[in-house]
Image: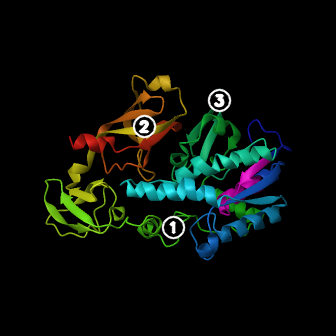
Amino acid sequence: MLDNVNPGARIAVAMSGGVDSSVAAALMVEAGYDVVGITLQLYDHGAMLNKKGACCAGQDIYDAKTVADKMGFPHYVLDYESVFKEKVIDDFADSYLQGETPLPCVRCNQQVKFKDLLQTARDLGAEALVTGHYVQRFPNEKAELHRAFDHNRDQSYFLFTTTQDQLEYLRFPLGGLPKSETRMHASRFGLTVAEKPDSQDICFVPNGSYANLVSKLRPGSLDAGDIIHINGTVLGRHEGIINYTIGQRKGLGISSPEPLYVIRLNPEKRQVWVGAHEALSISSVYLKEVNWLADINNFKSGLKCSVKIRSTHSLVEATVTATSPMSARVDFTIPEFGVASGQACVFYKKDQVLGGGWITSQHLQELEK
């Protein structure tokens, strides 16, 4: 049952063709809602038809339709290839060229799924849009976004750009379930996707090689440059900074008696700077495009909370200070290592998402002073 949405009401379900969104749709049918399934075709899926571990490919569209037919509700496929290329794929390529480590799945949620898809759901007369994400929404005075019951499945980091208005309209029925129970429901409903593996790759990178994709989209991105130790010594040459990311140790293409890590990237001069692990230590980062899900006034003098700087990292303690309506400074209680611009920093109070923003390269500029 969805909060503030009565059985019988029309709801839209975002269907990727995976087990999670399929079960979310089936549970809504079982609860008595008038379900409409929507799948976005985001790219030319011809090369992806036989590829496992990616969402929104041709097979996934077929799987979503099969589930809709099985459960007896209408299913629509919308062509969003041009929007996806402009807002997600091109942004991904440009971000790598700028020496960043991009997060295309967040950009997709921000620029496509939770923007145009929400509008489509409203146009269809739906009272809510349901997704299969593992996050929880609590309808307090304002709707709150919380981490999933199963922290190992939690996807709140990828949804930090969700606005308050969007959160009022969204529902996440799987947020309180462990994945094992989701698959149990899939088997109970007799869905063909019950044993389908989870998506793991970036959907538009068919062979897992980000550098190959970027080089095709942006000629010149594999131009050679120097690999430089932070003491100023030139150690070797590289074949494109897009092959490197902050904190990388393996595959540097140089020999050294000590372990070396990528410390920073200089795209203007095509330089890769390396150094010892301690050189990765960062005490503060600056954020842009901050989305506040809590009152910004609480952050004007600095608010102690927990933050996450990569999807795979644990929460760490920090103080978040709003520096403008859309920017913030994050001061870590204990210095962090391997902080990469282009990634997100999301803030939490216990399990509640307070907001988040995109990490800029400003901290690197301060290091170079």
- Tell me what residue is drawn at x 76 percent, y 49 percent: 12
Mark 3 near mark 1, Cβ–Cβ under 8 Å? no
Q: Amino acid at mark 1?
A: Val
- Between residues 300 and 219, which one lies in front from this camera angle? 219
The residue wearing badge 3 is: 140
CA separation in Å, label 2 and label 1: 32 Å
Identify the element where label 2 is drawn. Answer: strand
Residue placed under numbered mark 1 in the picture: 205
Q: Position of residue 102 (x, y in %)?
A: 44, 54
Q: Amino acid at mark 3?
A: Asn
The three-letter amino acid code for the residue at tag 2 is: Ser
Q: Can you tell which of label 2 and label 1 is closer to the viewer? A: 1
Label drawn at residue 306: 2
Q: Position of residue 247 (x, y in %)?
A: 30, 56
Total marks shown come to 3
Q: Quadrant of residue 364?
A: top left
Question: Which secondary structure lies at badge 3?
Answer: loop
Residue shown at the point (32%, 62%) measured from the top left: 241
Label whose residue precedes the other's in the sequence (3 or 1): 3
Q: Secondary structure at mark 1?
A: loop
Q: Which residues are magenta?
A: 11-27
Residue 24 among magenta residues: yes
Determine the residue positioned at 18% across, 70% down: 255
Please tell me whether mark 3 or mark 1 is closer to you in this view. Answer: 1
Based on the picture, tell me whether residue 123 belongs to the magenta stretch: no
Visible in this render: residue 118? yes
Question: Measured from the top left, where is residue 299 in percent x and y?
Answer: 44, 26
Q: Residue at x 61, y 65 (%)?
A: 43
